[in-house]
Image (cartoon, rainbow, N blue to C red):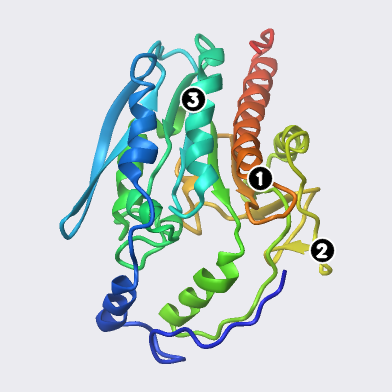
Amino acid sequence: MTTTQAPYPIGTPGTRWGNAEVAAWLARQTVKRSYEVDVLGAIETLRARFDVSEYGRLKYGSDSYPLFAIKSRDWRDELPIVLVTGGVHGYETSGVHGALQFVELHASHYEGKANLIVAPCVSPWAYERIHRWNADAIDPNRSFRDDSPAQESAALMRLVAPFRDRVLVHVDLHETTDSDESEFRPALAARDGVAYVPGEVPDGFYLVDDSEHPQPAFQQAVIAAVAKVTHIAPADGQGEIIGSPVVAPGVIEYALKQLGLCAGITDAPYKTTTEVYPDSPRATAEQCNAAQVAAVCAAIDFALASGAIKAGARSVV
């Protein structure tokens, strides 16, 4: 859908925000749901079967949020590593709950085949406020770089640093929502002092590949699995999705590392960013979670099989 937008209520058009504008924006943010209940409660139920560790803690004023990773209990150094991340953007609900649902229902299938590490909610402050940014009006998913200005991004990079060169597959779970056009892109334009140009929200699931190291067969394997759960986003009238050329059904490409995106934090040969559309009349919240789970499973299965084939070994899946 295409939307039009009145001037954003904070700031002066054409002028970047300063501290006063950020403070005014922050004052508008309110807690709408509970990280402790929704996420930490779910993680607690997994402790009997997986290793759960705190890898950092966010501090914003009086608010403090522990960050947790869920790891395979039978971690073996000779096995490939699979990284799953969710909730980099806190408002993208199925990224968080899809990651947790994958661990609950499917992680045990990969015991002895891969080491799993799942960070289900990278941005808990934003999760509670159903927002894209952190409390400093910074987008964590443009901040995965050295000396990151985002606490969330810096903490995840520290977690991954010891094994970043040994990751086989990384799946970063996201959503594209109607609020991208009604709130988040207008806010971004206002923050940066540029004109807001309305865009089109794609109706359906799609993937973002790495333009520097594309893996088209891998991406299509994920698309094929998800298509059994929910519909795949078509290209718009310009042959694009969110302004990028569609290179294959349901797939676009970004320069992941250059843009500071989460999916670029490792040297994994197989990596992708999922994008679910939860506002579609053709998809339920349950389908969105299931689509994220299907994407993770398909990505791992393809990567493990391809790795075994390249090594001249029999597939382990």
Q: Seen in the image, is 147 located left or right of residue 209?
A: left
Q: Seen in the image, is 132 located left or right of residue 43?
A: right
The answer to which of marks 1 and 3 sits earlier in the sequence is 3
Q: Amino acid at mark 1?
A: Thr
* 210 over 179 or under it: above or below: above
Q: Are marks 1 and 3 in contact (CB under 8 Å)?
A: no
- The answer to whether residue 27 is seen in the rendering is yes
Give the number of the mark in front: 3 or 2. 3
> What percent of the width, then of the height, locates residue 302?
68, 25
Image quarter in which the C terminus is found: top right
The residue drawn where x is 76% and y is 53% is 233
Q: Amino acid at mark 3?
A: Val
> As rendered, which of 34 and 149 lies closer to the eye?
34
> What percent of the width, then of the height, locates residue 71?
39, 23
> What percent of the width, then of the height, locates residue 99?
50, 34
The secondary element bearing badge 1 is classed as loop
What label does residue 239 carry, if any? 2
- Kindly identify which residue carries mark 1: 284
Q: Are marks 1 and 2 in contact (CB under 8 Å)?
A: no
Calculate the distance from the C-alpha at mark 3 to the C-alpha at mark 2: 36 Å
The answer to which of marks 3 and 2 sits earlier in the sequence is 3
The answer to which of marks 1 and 2 sits earlier in the sequence is 2
Image quarter in which the N terminus is found: bottom right
> What percent of the width, then of the height, locates residue 77?
40, 14
What label does residue 103 carry, if any? 3
Q: Are marks 3 and 2 in contact (CB under 8 Å)?
A: no
